[in-house]
Amino acid sequence: MKKANIYFDGKCVSHTVVLADGTKKSVGVIFPSRLTFNTGAPEIMEINAGRCRVLLPGSSDWQTFAAGQQFSVAGNASFEIETLETLDYVCHFG
């Protein structure tokens, strides 16, 4: 898919990639901001560069993640993310 996904007035820009086996991923960046995302399918967010704080569903504690780390979010949920530095990520769906 060639068209960029632009969300939150350009604060998040990603591209969707569908692999030969049907696996769907998105790769992108989130510029410093505080955003709320809604999931349709379960997601694993893999951080390539940058730092963020995340408030996961059902939690009252923010967790910090940085390059080389990842976090999971259930499907049909929402989570808050505060990017402390521009975040380069890969989102694995399913």
Image: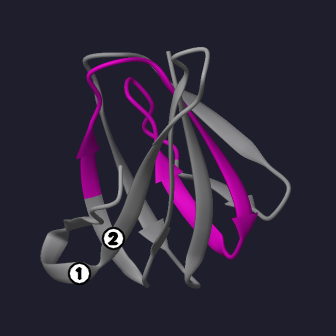
Tell me if label 2 and label 1 are in contact, CB under 8 Å: yes
| Vertical position of residue 8 compared to residue 78: above or below | below
Position of residue 22 relative to residue 4, above or below, is: above
Q: Is residue 37 magenta?
A: yes
Image position, residue 61 (x, y; %): 51, 44
Label 2 SS: strand
Instruction: Give the farthest residue toward the right.
Output: 68
* Magenta stretch bounds: 36-61
Q: Which mark is residue 46?
A: none
User: Percent from the top left, x then y, of residue 10?
Assistant: 23, 81
Residue position for label 2: 12
Residue that carries the numbered disc 1 in the rendered image: 10
Q: Residue furthest left?
A: 9
Residue 43, percent from left and from top: 49, 28
Q: Report whether 18 appears left or right of 66.
A: left
x and y percentages locating residue 81 in the rendered image: 41, 58
* Amino acid type, callout 1: Gly
Is the residue 85 above or below the residue 8 in the image? below
72 left or right of 49 in image: left
Residue at 86 percent across and 56 percent down: it is 68
- Seen in the image, is 37 located left or right of residue 89? left
Label 2, label 1: how many angstroms apart (C-alpha)? 5 Å
